Amino acid sequence: MKKHNFSAGPSILPQEVLLKASEAVVDYNNSGLSLIEISHRSKDFVGIMDNARSLAIELLGLEGKGYTALFLQGGASTQFLMVALNLLEKKAGYINTGAWSGKAIKEAKKIGNIVEVATSADANFNYIPKGIEIPSDLDYLHYTSNNTIFGTQFKDIPQTNAPLVCDMSSDIFSRTLDFSKFSLIYAGAQKNMGPAGTTLVVIKDEILGEVSREIPSILDYQLHIKADSMYNTPPVFPVYTSMLTLEWLKGLGGIARIEAENEKKSTVMYSEIDLNPLFTGFAAKEDRSPMNATFNLTDDKLKDTFETMLKEAGISGVNGHRSVGGYRASMYNALPLDSVKALVEVMSELESKA
């Protein structure tokens, strides 16, 4: 039985993408070779890389606006360091809304002066700070748009005159935004775009080349851009599968279309959390993430019963992160509405049994 996959990442991918990717691993494009056997310098893979990069720019509405898309390795965690190496000269500001922004701050502090301009640590990151006073003399402002662990999301783009850097690992391509307001966006593929192993980085070209330090070659965005995202051997399979996912998204009608579907899923999910007396949401209502719904049982005595019911219904990946506890339903682009309805049905059935 195909399970309802609510995993936070690596996470669900469209079924048609999985099928195409699996076929390519056996025989790519009737070449007699596997996708993961061909040279990354071959015409076939260069075409894949070029298409993936072009689709990312197109879907974000950044064509002709001076941006470059890269598919790099090392996960979003490497971007914590690369951002600071390439952009930090005097001082950078960070908004701390959870584990991943906290780790970004930790790495950036190794490079230079970092100011934490706001944090929601006082309430275990269950809300997004409001009314933030942002210094005017920053090299850049960094924030995490969606907080996977805590289930919160920035609904509005922070207002700043500094170059804006955003970790969009868990909500990239899920909602319409004016992406031209960002100078740099990065996102690990494994939550909403592809398998683990590659990270999308979208950079406004004009922001580079301003720091005085010598940057290690493998961590220099300009060298990756000059080499068309193939400065070193790229992660062939993750890039190909990400390309297939971006083609799938474009075929659906793009980000606006998937945003409407995501709103339906989150409405169904949060309505049950709010109406069912056996559950309580973790994140502040105004800051709830459409991608990651975090919630707890109001009576821990029901835990074993609930989890048995989840297993019997083929529902996977809803255990909450250890720092929050409870449950987390990740509803990324590829998760069908029927899976959300299946989870809600179990929650409702639990109420009828209690």
Image (spheres, rainbow, N blue to C red):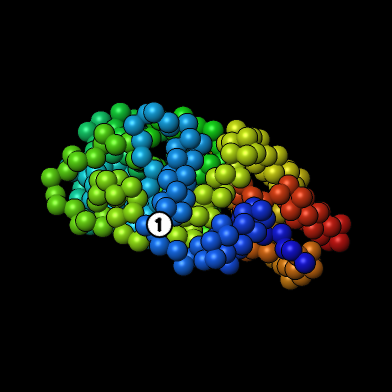
Q: Is residue 180 above or below residue 52?
A: above
Residue 271, image quadrant? top right
| 273 or 91: nearer the viewer | 91
Res 103 seen here: no
| 256 or 17: nearer the viewer | 17
Left or right: where 179 falls relative to 174: left
Q: For the residue labelled by badge 1, is the local secondary structure a helix, a strand or a loop?
A: loop
Residue 42, image quadrant? bottom left
Left or right: where 338 falls relative to 97: right
Res 160 seen here: yes
Q: Residue at x 68, y 64 (%)?
A: 316
Q: Residue at x 75, y 68 (%)?
A: 311
Which quarter of the rendered picture does the C terminus lie within? bottom right
Q: Is residue 43 above or below residue 256?
A: below
Place of residue 252 in the rendered image (x, y in percent of width and height, measured from the top left) = 65, 39
Report the residue that reaches farthest toward the front: 31
Q: Residue at x 52, y 66 (%)?
A: 33
Which quarter of the rendered picture does the N terminus lie within? bottom right
Place of residue 121 in the rendered image (x, y in percent of width and height, measured from the top left) = 43, 51
Residue bearing mark 1 = 42
Place of residue 47 in the rendered image (x, y in percent of width and height, measured from the top left) = 45, 48
Q: Residues within 10 Å of mark 1 (few under 14, many from 20)?
A: few
Q: Identity of the amino acid at label 1? A: Ser
Q: Residue at x 50, y 44 (%)?
A: 172
Residue 32, image quadrant? bottom right
| 121 or 261: nearer the viewer | 261
